[in-house]
Amino acid sequence: MEKQNLTEISTRLGESYLAWGRISKLDGVPRPRRTEVYQLVDKLFEIVYPGFWGRPAISKGDTPRITTENLAIAAEMLTKLVVQAQSFCPTPPQGTKYSSPGRVVADFMERLPDIREMLLSDVISALKGDPAVYETDSIIYCYPTTIAVTTQRLAHELFRLGVPLLPRAMSEYAHSRTGIDIHPGATIGKGFFIDHGTGVVIGETTTIGDNCKLYQGVTLGAASFPHGQDGLIIRGHKRHPTLEDNVIVYSNASVLGNITVGRGATIHGSVFLTQSVPPGCTVSSTPVELKMKNKCMAIGRGFIPEFEI
Amino acid sequence: MEKQNLTEISTRLGESYLAWGRISKLDGVPRPRRTEVYQLVDKLFEIVYPGFWGRPAISKGDTPRITTENLAIAAEMLTKLVVQAQSFCPTPPQGTKYSSPGRVVADFMERLPDIREMLLSDVISALKGDPAVYETDSIIYCYPTTIAVTTQRLAHELFRLGVPLLPRAMSEYAHSRTGIDIHPGATIGKGFFIDHGTGVVIGETTTIGDNCKLYQGVTLGAASFPHGQDGLIIRGHKRHPTLEDNVIVYSNASVLGNITVGRGATIHGSVFLTQSVPPGCTVSSTPVELKMKNKCMAIGRGFIPEFEI
Amino acid sequence: MEKQNLTEISTRLGESYLAWGRISKLDGVPRPRRTEVYQLVDKLFEIVYPGFWGRPAISKGDTPRITTENLAIAAEMLTKLVVQAQSFCPTPPQGTKYSSPGRVVADFMERLPDIREMLLSDVISALKGDPAVYETDSIIYCYPTTIAVTTQRLAHELFRLGVPLLPRAMSEYAHSRTGIDIHPGATIGKGFFIDHGTGVVIGETTTIGDNCKLYQGVTLGAASFPHGQDGLIIRGHKRHPTLEDNVIVYSNASVLGNITVGRGATIHGSVFLTQSVPPGCTVSSTPVELKMKNKCMAIGRGFIPEFEI
């Protein structure tokens, strides 16, 4: 292209940057690099699943040294990212203020052993729930549920600690790799397993009990949003479902609104649910009548009259 | 493996390359590298969202120099890719011919400031539409809607300019990262927001008005394809829906065929729609009867008789 | 963070590694690196689609040399990965034992020319089935169906040869990039095309005939799992559907259980199917009654009375 044309476009863009500053950030403040967020997540995976993620082999004797080393690296990465995230989003949500990065990082790191206890229960649930696998190593090595649920459990801790930007960036990293979109705000009990997973959406104020199982395409979503007098959506409201313990939701079901699905209930595939369900119940749709008609006798193996089932 | 066995397989493959040339390209003509397509998209994101994508910090004073630099880089990358794409796909669709790469690149680059105006409206719509966010920075930083819709707006310009291969490669880059599949041919008004997004499909001849909102799993698709006398599908036909302004389509709804959803209409979740909808209407399915039965009294908190709701 | 705090956390993690050894692998045995699995898949794509994947240009004269070279590289990569996978998962499924890596690799490599014949048929089916494309080059270059189905055909061979871990890691690589989740165990005939594809799930014991077509969001899944006396799921059972030749399943339909969809049958969008379908039939849901009501007359272009369609 002609240099002159480029300069003209550059000038028009420069005006646009000033006019629409909301989508231009020209204050020279460095934002957290996405790649560094992803590296942090990968390093945390190495810490919680040693031998399965990160360096490809680790022996018992080396573990203390390597673990301490990894913790120091993770703490340093996280500190840098928290500082940057707080500068990048200088205004905390109304009525809150940011904790010091040092405090956040210390609180977060201390949670890692407890998180590991949750992860063990998740892996056991996957083994129990998936007939296509006979051992847990491959679940940890390559199942999307491991990526999505582990990332959410890590992001959730940062979310609780009021860290801006990073929890969502972490969960979007998992979403991008798995098609599973779990808001870092969701509260999830132990033994959680998502099979296949693509298309799963779990909203911010969802609560999930212990030993629940979801399949691909399940939405745990909001039914409607209350709006304030200013016409804007009121935020922070409990608007997503509560699943009690031992609930199973089969593929492509939608569970919407601040309803409760009772302990041990089962929601069948493609059910569209907007009301609470008592414990122990199985919910299915009355089968929709299916119509079959013979499309093409030449293809069929004989004459099939039009009929309904 | 034995060298001899490898040579035998190589010979068989060589025969296969010649016999089935459609899936082997042995003319020595370099194809556009996928990684360079992705780098172009990333560079364009840096240009339209400075400070949010690309280099992690930029200050007002540096903006003119860096913008001009980035534009020159992007123009050079795009020129190379357009030349390669035209060589790689030497036959344009029937009745058309390729413009000169220089013309295409100049026309494309000039559109960038106007595209930014659309992107601002998209970001504002996301803020208005998502109760889980309270500022726009994180929307630009990590929301899938930003990746998918911005990429489509860029790819759409190249599609309109008749560039082969690249627009689709760009939209598949976004599809891969977000699960949102928007054909570069779709025409989309300002203020467009897709929440969550995994599983969204928007077909080639779709038209979307201003300030529309879609949720995960929504298909704006074709109901059927007309076939020509040669038995092949007729291409280029308007076969996807038109959404007028201010339409909302909730999760997992399917809107199929060349129908019109009128201004301000709302399509509820999981609705399967194959007919036009007048303006201002809300469309929902008559609730399917749900059957509940007590699966296991041992799990429930007491006896729940079988009942229907 | 204080060094002392890090040491304390490290100690707690060390105890956790020993206590919950299922999610820690401290035996010093190197696992197959995920990045090397992905590089293997990419190299195999270069071999089966020369000129479309891998090096950006290849001419007829160079083909024999480059092909032999690529085969040798792929064989070496695969050998290393098979050895590692067998060490990483030392216990084969009950009643089976692992073949020697050399045998596995030789058997796999010999299948490549035949696999190419399948891939050609897949690409032709995509051209016939997608009205948005007019040539096959872009299908091979960037369509998700190409990534997902080709990867499955490769992974399926390793699955048949009893290789642990790798087939699933390969299919999860494709799943992550496309949203299409095809178990490596599924048996798929020639001429297979998946349009759009996000959310497609095809289970382990599925059988698909020749020239079938699926759209986004289709599940070919299990309806229920039989459990053994130990309360655990019985594995390896035929629990997924069989599609005969020339079957089309439209978007978001669920086809569940060990049922047969007969030759030439068509399953319409969003159908929930749990019973077999005779050949040549078209299956659709009786349309659910839609309710429309006027949400806001101010938005509509006039008064639209509440009505049902």
Image (spheres, coloured by chain):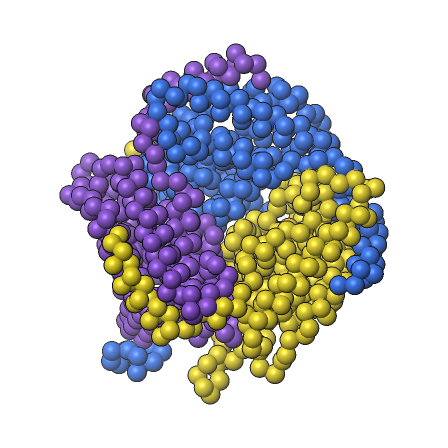
Chain colours: A yellow, B purple, C blue
- Residue plotted at (45% across, 86% down): A230
Residue nearest the viewer, comparing C251 with B141: B141
A239 to the left or right of C247: right
Height in image: A81 above or below C48?
Answer: below
- Residue plotted at (33% across, 66% down): A13
C128 to the left or right of A214: left
| Quarter residue B95 falls in | top left
Most distant residue in the bottom direction: A229
In x, y percent, where is residue B63? 40, 65
- Residue plotted at (70% across, 54% down): A73
| Quarter residue A281 falls in | bottom right
Residue nearest the viewer, comparing B287 with A210: A210
Height in image: B302 above or below A64?
Answer: below
- Residue plotted at (55% across, 59% down): A33
A230 to the left or right of B238: right
In x, y percent, where is residue B50? 43, 64
Most distant residue in the top direction: B4
Say whether residue B252 is visible: no
Marks counted in the figure total 0
In x, y percent, where is residue B241? 29, 59
Say whether residue B55 is visible: yes
Most distant residue in the left direction: B95
C131 to the left or right of B48: left
In x, y percent, where is residue B123? 41, 69
| Quarter residue A263 falls in | bottom right
